[in-house]
Image (cartoon, helix red, strand yellow):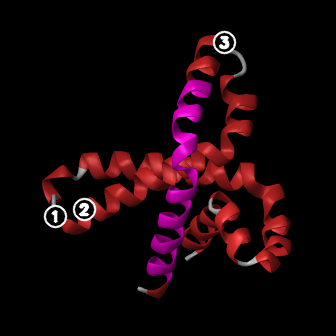
Amino acid sequence: MILSIIALLGGIIAASPVIIAKKPNAKELIDKITPYQGWIGVVLAVLGLIGIIQMILHLSAFSLVWLIGLAASVVQFVVGFLLGYGLISQYVLEKNETAKEKGQQLRLKLMKYQIPAGIVLIVLAVLSLVL
């Protein structure tokens, strides 16, 4: 349940431009969780990476549920990487200039998917909380 709440918060931050455009009064709530964006992103990126690895290891269980799990893990990783890039860059990539440059290139490629991925992550988090 806590992981679903973290995913929901990450989705809200990632999709905040759309949410604020539709509900301007949501800006106050989003402003309260934005300072934690980096840490939420790092947690989501790690959970997404773990989920992707688990899905690959359990490839023999290929089914619709497996595909949904893989998609959810990929979305978590993308949103987490985008939200947590500042902290990831500061603590992990800082010592290696090549890794930092490649990380920035990946971030720029993924930026156009931030809002759609945030919306998908919100839906997946709500579904996991309900189910």
Per the picture, the main secondary structure of the magenta-coloured stretch is helix
Q: Which residue is mark 2?
A: 66
Callout 3–callout 2 Cβ contact below 8 Å: no
Q: Amino acid at mark 1?
A: Ser
Q: Nearer the viewer, residue 96 or 86?
A: 86
Q: Is residue 31 part of the magenta span, yes or no?
A: no
Q: Amino acid at mark 2?
A: Trp
Location of the N terminus (image quadrant): bottom right
Q: Where residue 112 sits in the image (x, y, percent)?
A: 54, 44
Give neighbour class at mark 3: few <14, some 14-19, many 20+ (Cα, 10 Å): few
Residue 46 is at least partly visible in this image: no
Q: Where residue 125 sits in the image (x, y, percent)?
A: 51, 73
Q: Report the side of 57 relative to 81 (left or right).
A: left
Q: Which residue is mark 3?
A: 97
Residue at (50% x, 57% y) in the render: 117
Relative to 27, residue 13 above or below: above
Q: Amino acid at mark 3?
A: Glu
Relative to 16, residue 81 above or below: above
Residue at (50% x, 55% y) in the render: 76
Q: Which residues make up the magenta segment?
A: 103-129
Residue 60 is at least partly visible in this image: yes
Callout 2–callout 1 Cβ contact below 8 Å: yes
Is label 1 in a helix, a strand or a loop?
loop
Q: Which mark is residue 63?
A: 1
Q: Residue 2 sits in which quadrant?
A: bottom right
The answer for how far apart the CA atoms under marks 3 and 2 are is 37 Å
Give neighbour class at mark 2: few <14, some 14-19, many 20+ (Cα, 10 Å): some
Give neighbour class at mark 1: few <14, some 14-19, many 20+ (Cα, 10 Å): few
Location of the C terminus (image quadrant): bottom left
Q: Residue furthest bottom?
A: 130
Is label 2 in a helix, a strand or a loop?
helix
